[in-house]
Amino acid sequence: MSLFASEETVKIYFDDQGNLVETETSNWFEVRKELSQELYDIFRNEMAPKGKMRYVGANPVIEIESTEAPGFPYGFLAKVIKNWSESVPVTIANLKKVSKKILEQLWEKLLEMYELNKSNMLLEEFKEEENEEIS
């Protein structure tokens, strides 16, 4: 075992209808098997909304302007996708051309695979900002 995140990759397959499948097909994305801290930080930065958190009782309430909500994390995807079945390189511009259905399923699979819980990550981000303001 190494202290460094693995450079190993796994393939995620889609059928001709754009459904995520377990069997090998001609439509695939090859992604990093695990995240490094650097990639996790990129994920957090792309997904963190710019807004304010306040508490109602003991419950946090996040207020986000709709113009400041995070978009789809193309930059993060471009870094974790090492290869794909298309003949063009994996770039942000090319990722934007991928079917919405496929990208959404790929995204959900990656969140599960990397154990990224968006709601916990968002709360963690706001708590860090709150602590910085207090210091």
Image (cartoon, grey):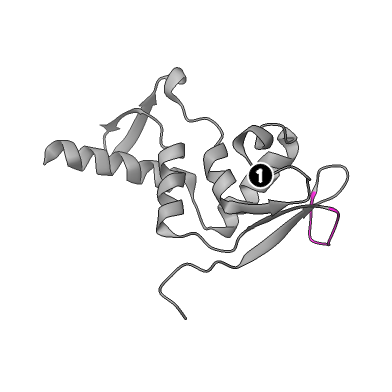
Residue lying at the far left in this picture: please name it: 135
Residue beneath the point at 71% across and 60% down? 11
Q: Is 91 situated left or right of 22 in this image?
A: left
Is 39 located above or below residue 54 in the figure? below
Residue lying at the far right in this picture: please name it: 16
Is 63 located above or below residue 16 in the figure? above
Q: Is 21 situated left or right of 124 in this image?
A: right
Residue beneath the point at 59% across and 64% down? 33
Which region is colored magenta? 20-26
Percent across and percent down for residue 88 are: 74, 42
Give the quadrant of residue 57: top left
Name the one closer to the observer, 16 or 6. Answer: 6
Name the one closer to the observer, 37 or 62. Answer: 37
Is residue 25 one of those drawn in magenta?
Answer: yes
Is 64 located above or below residue 90 in the figure? above
Residue beneath the point at 68% across and 40% down? 103
Percent across and percent down for residue 25 are: 85, 56
Percent across and percent down for residue 135 are: 11, 41
| Residue that numbered label 1 is attached to | 90
Percent across and percent down for residue 86 are: 78, 45
Give the quadrant of residue 3: bottom left
Is 132 located above or below residue 9 in the figure? above
Main SS class of the magenta portion in the image: loop
Is residue 49 one of those drawn in magenta?
Answer: no
Residue lying at the far front in this picture: please name it: 88
Residue beneath the point at 36% across and 30% down? 62
Give the quadrant of residue 24: bottom right
Residue type (three-letter) at the residue carrying disc 1? Val
Figure disc tally: 1
